[in-house]
Image (tube, rainbow, N blue to C red):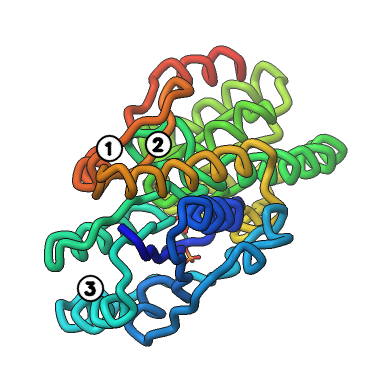
Amino acid sequence: VTKIAVLTSGGDAPGMNAAIRAVVRTGIYYGLEVYGVVRGYNGMIEDDIFKMDSRSVANIIQRGGTILKTARSKEFMSPEGRQKAYANLIKRGIDGLVVVGGNGSFTGALKLHEEFGLPCVGIPGTIDKDLYGTDFTIGFDTAVNTAVEAIDKIRDTADAHDRLFIVEVMGRDAGYIALHSGIATGAEHILIPEEDTSVEEVIAGLSEKEKRKKLVNLIVVAEGHKSGGANHIAEIVKQQLPNLDTKVTILGHLQRGGSPSCIDRLIASRMGYHAVESLLQGRHNVMVGILDNAMKYTPLEIAIREKQRFSDEWLKIVKILAS
Ligand code: F6P
């Protein structure tokens, strides 16, 4: 490998810039040419690729978003789109690719490997923390801290008015943001896609607490929970427990922005460095991850296929602490 490209793809995540910086500077340290691809696989198809140097990544470690921009590319899903994209890499002699993103982004990288033999390495970058083979994904720590800060503020006003707030956080298929932010803010109920809690069970819990005169302020729900989200739950709660003063807050994309936390900057720097090392050492088509504080390399097809194991212990802790 002598010339590598780096791109960010899928939903942005705070810390992606720190990862880009690490890839560029490690590549240059080892004498590689490093290229940036703009707007993920879309930029690869449209030939929006530029050579980067140490200076191109100055003053970005503390910034949210991604200087390379990001996209979810439809065109790249077709063989013609990928052919076009690969031709743009080849004409520059690019013989290695680092992809920062989630599941969909790794699927694209795997396709490039299968169809053209391009060596690729994935770096887990998603606020959802829904990837197998790593304890950390870039952006999760920042997003969950943003959620905690917001929910703390909601709790103040909820408490002042004796209101019930149903707060919806991000997480399409994974409930980690809901679980971590819910526990950290003392939520009475936490609803996540991994668990089958029905709205009826929540209602039963709320009315039981009402009888005990326990004030209930807070339900945290992941957007991907089977109920369909905070608004749906609120409608049912209002119908069945009209005595409660129920409000909804949807945190939304607020959770995706902001300056990355120290942890996100650290893991992004470490993963970026190891992604380049991995390409140089011939460890291709893997996702670099961190498990038990050691680097772990998971084949992309496994990282895509497997689900992160969910610990039931957390759910027990939620029930005990919220009673
Ligand atoms: O995967 C990250 C994520 O923020 C999910 O939690 C959310 O469901 C999705 O992206 C939102 O995507 P978009 O920004 O395209 O609406």
Query: Where does label 2 land, which residue?
Result: 289
Mark 3 and mark 2 in contact? Answer it, CB < 8 Å: no
Q: Residues within 10 Å of mark 2 (few under 14, many from 20)?
A: many
Mark 1 and mark 2 in contact? Answer it, CB < 8 Å: yes
Mark 1 falls on what kind of element? strand
| Label 3 vs 2, first from the N-terminus | 3
Q: Residue furthest left?
A: 115
Q: Is residue 250 visible?
A: no
| Label 1 vs 2, first from the N-terminus | 2
Give above or below for 122 relative to 8.
above
Task: Indicate the amino acid at tag 2.
Answer: Gly
Q: Residue at x 25, y 48 (%)?
A: 284
Q: Is residue 318 left or right of residue 312?
A: right
Q: Residues within 10 Å of mark 1 (few under 14, many from 20)?
A: some
Q: Which mark is residue 298?
A: 1
**Numbered-mark total:** 3
| Label 3 vs 1, first from the N-terminus | 3
Q: Position of residue 73 (x, y in %)?
A: 34, 75
Q: Residue furthest right?
A: 160
